[in-house]
Amino acid sequence: MEPIIQLKNLDKHYGEKQVLKGINLDIFPGQVIGYIGPNGAGKSTTVKILCGLISDYEGTVIVDGIDLKTDPLAVKRKVGYVPELAELYDVLTPAEFLGFMAELYGMPKEIADERMQKMLAAFGLETNMHQRMDTFSKGMRQKVLIISGLLHNPDIIILDEPLSGLDANSVIIVKDLISKLAKDGKTIFYCSHMMDVVEKVSDRIVLINDGTVIADGSFEELQNQQGNQSLEKIFAHMTAKGSLNDAADQLMRAFEN
Amino acid sequence: MNIINRFFFNIVMLPSSVYEGMGVDTTQLKSILKIKLAMDDRRASSFQQTRAQKNKKPVKLATLGTMFLTLMMGAFFLFSFFVGNDDVTKGTIYFSMYIFMLAATLISDFTSVLIDVRDNMIILPKPVSDRTFLLSRLLHIVVHISKLILPMTLPAMILIGINRGIGGVSSFSFLVFLATLFTIFLINALYIFILRVTTPERFKTIISYFQIFIAIAFYASYQLVPRLVNKAELENYHVGDNFLVWIAPSYWFANAWNLLNNADFSIGAIISLLLSIAVPITSIWVVIKYFAPNFNRKLSMISGSEAGAAPLPKNGKIINSTTSSYLTLVSKWFSRKGAERMAFLLTYKITSRSREFKMKVYPSMGYLVVYLVMIFFTNKKMTVADLSYGSAASKILFISLIYFSSFMLIMATGQIQYSDKFKAAWIYFTTPIKEPGMLLSGAIRAMIVKFYLPLISAITILSLVFMGPAIIPNLVLGCANQLFITAMVGYISVRELPFSHAQDQVKINFIRGLFTFLIPATVAGLHYLIYSFMPVVIILAVLASIAYWMVMDSIRKKNWSNLITTYED
């Protein structure tokens, strides 16, 4: 099978600082990639390159046979992006915002309207459809963002901490949605700090640290390599500089005065 | 979309086929532009921003409101046509005001409206070509500026139309266009300069200082200009008399207008015309060619969304040790250990670092300075000898100085309960604080030390130098009165914990207005009457000091039931 996303020797510098140091990845259709790493490891940078926010990278990114550098628009059409921070134009209503998104993707209005209505209803936002989002809670904004990433039915979905601000029931919906989308043949690139969620939703985990991939495989494979423990433990073992147990001990010892 | 936005939208979309020929996706262009204009309509303009920040009502039809305000401003500019007896003078004043006001408006609009950093996250990942995006931004800027300059110049256009006919209007429009280009260049140059010398993180702070400066300058010109020049001088004023006027671009525009309008083909007029055309066009070209590429990238970092791109700020994070040792010292002198000192330090530090607080309080300091300058200008004949103790002039000056000195303090004290970060007030509610009054008195003390101590020290030194020790009783009385009034403001209006509430405009304006102007003015009047009766002054000084001490003490003793202590979530 042809990989749908290929990263080859992906490098990115910010001035002197090299954030990505030769990332190589082949991602296949229908995979749910859990992309994890400590803060500053280069997760967000990879995501931003993939969805076209950063264009001055070195190396090659090929999405569905198209080079991101030569035809970024064709790639962007295939990708749906749910950004991490609740970045949206909050003086607009969900209907206006999503309608705008649909127009940018060149969707026919009738299809877009019907689809967004159904999606908002599924998230329980149908009554808020024509309210300005500046009054929305973080969770409600996040739902609108998730819809905006899925509306044009993209083949590749990039989710950056999609569960932030969502209540427990919505978390269940989104987790369920992720596995259903994957069954449907969509490729999902899932970035998160929540190890327990990543462990459950992804069928392949990519761990990066300091700009390089340090582990790549299914959760079972990682367990085979690193010992039979939770993803949280494996993550800590591979990325923490000292022992985390010691840190907790030090914290406890601080009371001893 | 309201009628005005639709009008401009249709105008800028007229050359659709040209755009398509350039490889722009006009469907996307239309939807971006439509959404941008819709958002403009729901955002408080830069005129309304300072006032309507926490207004619960959603902003609607902001475009119409802004345009009306701009129209009023344009009408105000008309006064320049009544100054001097030649067109060059009138035009120079008009163009100076025009460039200044347009620049003042655009400085804030460029970041908040025209270059919305959220675009990066929202539009960039969508299949929108760079050309389409760039053109949408450009057209948005064109529409936005047109919405400003049309109402701003309309009154002048009408006046010129009546006096000079269509020829006058068209030559004037041409120069207004050039002056607008020049102003856009000015703003760009300013932005580029600020971005060069500082980090993007501090950019917004600097822009807000500019806004404060502009507010003060506007107030100053409003107060000072009519006083400095009398009517007869105004009518015979001739701007060309001074060679230095060539430095001001508004003079070139005015001269060029004079050439086109009155067929004045002097060397100076021709040079002016050339300058008015060449300078805006070259400067815009320089900006596009040399600065713009770097500029957009840097500007996109202002949001902090690309935190990885910016190196850690070299200066900001380490707190200067000399100020903090000064702070430790004054906090020991002026506050009691415990909750009071904590509130003192917290208030002192937050008010030094919060942009929001500075925006509210610092302009008032500027107004004060302007006011003082004004007093000196209106009393031009005053000499040092007049300042000696006992003279009528020194009496008025002393009283106004000492009672004005608390203006800032009272403004600041009225503000301490408000903050954008009011949710952080959970710290007061989750910690076992027995006497919340300590928090208030600590905060008020911090304000006194910060906004009054330096001023009153300066006043003390100045009055001792000029008036001698005889002034001391009056000084003490004035100072005690000021502190007493401040404490009363604290006692009555500060019924919420420091920084614990969102700004509620209507309520505070009345109380604050009363305390900042009416009561100090009344007390100042009374003080003026008894100024020379030394025993009365001494007795009142003692009484006022005791009153101050008692009010501060009862603030300290306020318990939870005396305060409005709801945690606003």
Image (tube, coloured by chain):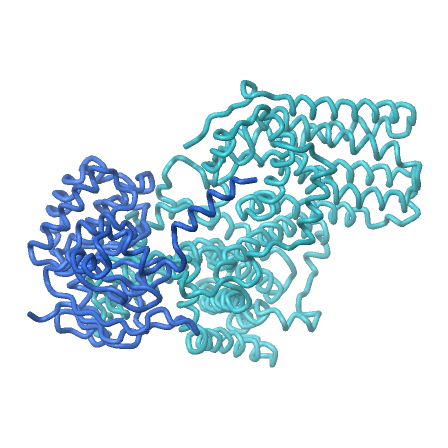
Chain colours: A blue, B cyan
Q: Position of residue B406 (x, y in %)?
A: 71, 37
**Left or right: where A129 falls relative to B467:** left
Above or below, B362 relative to A168? below
Above or below, B397 relative to B15? above
Q: Position of residue B131 (x, y in %)?
A: 27, 70
Residue at (23%, 52%) from the top-left corner? A229
Q: Position of residue B142 (x, y in %)?
A: 37, 62
| Quadrant of the drawing holding the C terminus of chain A | top right
Q: Residue furthest top?
A: B561
Residue at (31%, 42%) from the top-left corner? A138
**Left or right: where B344 falls relative to B355:** right
Residue at (57%, 64%) from the top-left corner? B91
Q: Is residue A105 visible?
A: no
**Left or right: where B521 falls relative to B205:** right
Q: Nearest the camera: A57 or B21?
A: A57
| Quadrant of the drawing holding the N terminus of chain A | bottom left
Q: Nearest the camera: A105 or A54?
A: A54
* Snapshot quadrant of residue B510: top right
Above or below, B100 relative to A71? above
Q: Residue furthest bottom?
A: B267
**Left or right: where A204 falls relative to A167:** left
* Snapshot quadrant of residue B177: bottom left
Q: Position of residue B394 (x, y in %)?
A: 87, 40
Q: Nearest the camera: A181 or B395?
A: A181
Q: Nearest the camera: B17 or B312?
A: B312
